[in-house]
Amino acid sequence: MGWGSCLAALACVGLLRFAEAAISAAVDPSSQSFVLPDGRTAVFHGLNAVYKLPPYIPCWDCGFDPQLSLNQGDIKTLRSWGVTAIRLGVMVEAVLPQALLGEVNDTYVAAVVQLAERLGEAGIYTLVDAHQDVLSRSFCGEGFPEFAVSTGNLSQWEKFPSPLPVRIDTDPTTGLPNLTQCQEVEFALFNGAFEVGAAWGGLYNNMTVRSYFAKHWSAVSQAFGKAASSQESPLKLLGYELLNEPVPYPITSALEQGYGDRVNLQPLYDQLYAAVRRQDNSTVVLYEPSVTNMLLGQVSGFKSGPGGRTDDDRQGMALHLYCNALNASGDVVNVTDCESSLDGLFDLASSSFATAGGGRMITEFGAVGGSAGDAATLSSVLDRADESGVSWAYWTFKGFNDITTVNSVTESLFGTDGEPQPLKAAALARSYPHLVPAALGAPCRFRFSHSSPLRELVVEYTVGRAGPGTGAASLTAVLFGSPTYHYVGGANVTVLPPGAGVVHMEQAADGSGWTGWVTVEHPQASVGVPVRLTLQALTPQNATQAAP
């Protein structure tokens, strides 16, 4: 496995902002890593939870459902898998459902904040995602309500789905495209329809539509920012992601490297960023370049985030990295082609991240089935992520009635029998350092040998206190290793040099044993000392072994 890199440092301006606000996460511009207020570098392993149809929120006050729930039992499962972040869909059409200048649906906003607070109680951070695919149900997608889609004066023959050679009838009850027929077509193809292209142009150029979108972000950032800065709220806020998978306008402009980012997205993101900052001046804002960049082998056209370089401690780029060799069930059909495409995608991502500055995160990848080949592909992606220490969120935790994906059931973590897909879960529940008190400017490196019998995780860094914290937490590392999938017979943690850290293996309250979480408390005397932490299985196990 490769070595991870997670330089931990904080600019002085970042320290000042930490002192002023109670926001959970920020960015260290020198390493492009997430950091906590006490100065520790944070690596997040996450999952997506995006409910694209009414009620636009996972069922969080119901019993377990393998495709729909995100309840207390699910949250307990997430923690047992080492999940520390959820990319939560907070849908525009749910926040502002009535009219372009209508009232905010405060009930919905309060509900998603409350769900995020429940996640926070378990130590799980929330990345708030303004999700869309093909913009609207008017075009077999989701995201914006029909009245917020501006397409101009199109002729009848230009109406959706023209010029695509498919038949999509209108549902007589809803007046919207027939959903069954919609799902018979690969959803990304709908972005080639004349009317969808015009709608993207409307989002970028129609100031009324842009102001409507800005109002969404104003309302959402006000609610989440207020909760995250409250001493009473358990919310842990990772950030806001402005727009999912934007498509350049016109679609042919995708052939010009960086056009969609410079011409379409930069003005829109500037407006949305300003709307967020008027309500919440600290939380990290993530922005995604044109979705066609990666498909066409292009680096991003962004030279900085929407806040400019001065805001690199509170903004970052989000990218989606998908293997190009998947079939309709999400299974990898050509491992060689998949590996080759991943090499190219990570090279593009590295260049795009470095050029734009600020933070970085892979907020979607995967969408695979549950076979051994699919799990191997996931591990291959995550080995590459470890090499750079980048945080990530797999698509998806559950299906959540997804209408715009390859296969919402097979790509989730649960099978139709309600049980976790074990190979996929094992690949995602990999060992890693969630929090590391690395010294200013000193590298933190980590690697996880997931295919070795001992499942060895090695973490190396120089102990330091980069933030203002004076308590023990700022000198405490937090590691995860799954007792279900990787350490069935238990695990051991060693710290070198001897005496440089005190190890605590978290025990379950119900007496069932080790939870998988480990803390290593470094004494004050260890500041400036290079340390090596090693997590190993007590008994060897094979590649597919898991606890019953």
Image: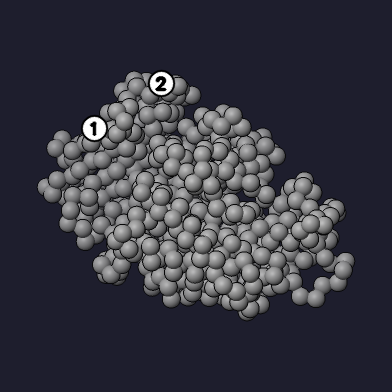
Name the outermost residue toward the left: 525
| Residue type (three-letter) at the residue carrying disc 2 | Gln
Please report whichever mark, 1 or 2, sits nearer to the chain's N-terminal start. Answer: 1
Q: Quadrant of residue 171?
A: bottom right
Residue depicted at 34% across the width and 58% down the height = 233
Q: Taking 196 as reference, is 289 left or right?
A: left
Could you say which disc has been placed on residue 541 in the image? 2
Q: Taking 330 as reference, is 507 left or right?
A: left
Q: CA distance from mark 1 to mark 2?
A: 20 Å
Query: Element under label 1?
Result: strand
436 to 307, vertically: above or below: above
Looking at the picture, tell me which residue is in the foreground, 83 or 53: 53
Q: Residue 466: percent from the left, percent from the top?
A: 24, 58
| Residue that carries the numbered disc 1 in the rendered image | 494
Looking at the picture, tell me which residue is in the foreground, 192 or 483: 483
Could you say which disc has been placed on residue 37 in the image? none
Q: Quadrant of the C terminus?
A: top left
Q: Taking 300 as reference, is 467 left or right?
A: left
Q: Residue 367: percent from the left, percent from the top?
A: 59, 42
